[in-house]
Image (spheres, coloured by chain):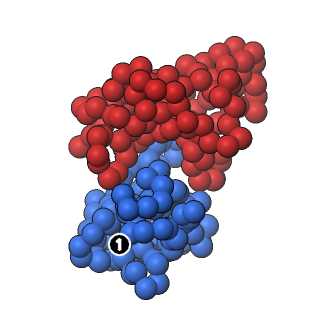
Amino acid sequence: GAVVSQHPSWVICKSGTSVKIECRSLDFQATTMFWYRQFPKQSLMLMATSNEGSKATYEQGVEKDKFLINHASLTLSTLTVTSAHPEDSSFYICSARPGRSTEAFFGQGTRLTVV
Amino acid sequence: AQSVAQPEDQVNVAEGNPLTVKCTYSVSGNPYLFWYVQYPNRGLQFLLKYITGDNLVKGSYGFEAEFNKSQTSFHLKKPSALVSDSALYFCAVRADASGGSYIPTFGRGTSLIVHP
């Protein structure tokens, strides 16, 4: 089956620094990738949708200058949390959809802790 | 707008007993429906989906789900629960190409606890 690899699995950073999270589709080309944020015991909140080679579409309320998304190739999308603050601490999950597939496949998630 | 409701925050069941995790949906056009499972500090794993065809869909790990158009439901079921099934389960819906959003909407999740 399709595999999506997310790296790192967990990261601790100091307040004010930036953190980059990578999402790779290992055995398929992902024309669309999604970035989600999940709070404890809550559902996934869609942050943005990215299509290869174009600017990401952010959901309402998500700061595009704080959460930078780059989808430079059909197998890689990155989320950079800039000037991180403790309130950015969360579980971030990416998913990727192959071509015209009806389903998306998820990475294992990244636990971000900002201290 | 499309939406998903998982009315139970938590479902408790004894090992060996049948389990049901409920899901109802609202979407414009024909629905594509999905179930995912999430273990602690992990991403979501795909269990099964309904696109078209038989209303009873069989998926991974012995799970199945029944699509009921009149009740707009897609409940997840398993005949005999295992302790290892304990996890967080998410139902998701998206519209088909005829209308609505192709981006899936997720329910709030249901925590399944299977007791030995």
Chain that is coloured blue in the picture:
B
Please tell me whether mark 1 sits on a helix, a strand or a loop.
strand
Is B34 above or below relative to A46?
below
Q: Which x, y percent locates residue A65? A: 68, 23
Q: Residue at x 57, y 63 (%)?
A: B1
Most extreme residue toward the bottom, as rendered?
B70
Q: Position of residue A73 (x, y in %)?
A: 36, 22
Q: Is residue B105 visible?
A: yes
Where in the figure is residue B78, as x and y percent of width and height?
35, 73
Q: Chain of mark 1?
A: B
Q: Whole-percent x and y of residue B49?
A: 33, 62
Q: Looking at the picture, tell me which residue is in the foreground, B11 or B31.
A: B31
The amino acid sitting under disc 1 is: Ala
Asked whether A23 or A72 is in front, the reply is A72
B59 left or right, relative to A87 = left
Q: Which residue is mark 1?
A: B65
User: Which hue is chain A drawn in?
Assistant: red
Which residue is pictured at 55% across the width and 36% down the height? A57
In the picture, measured across the screen, residue B53 lies left or right of residue A55, that is left
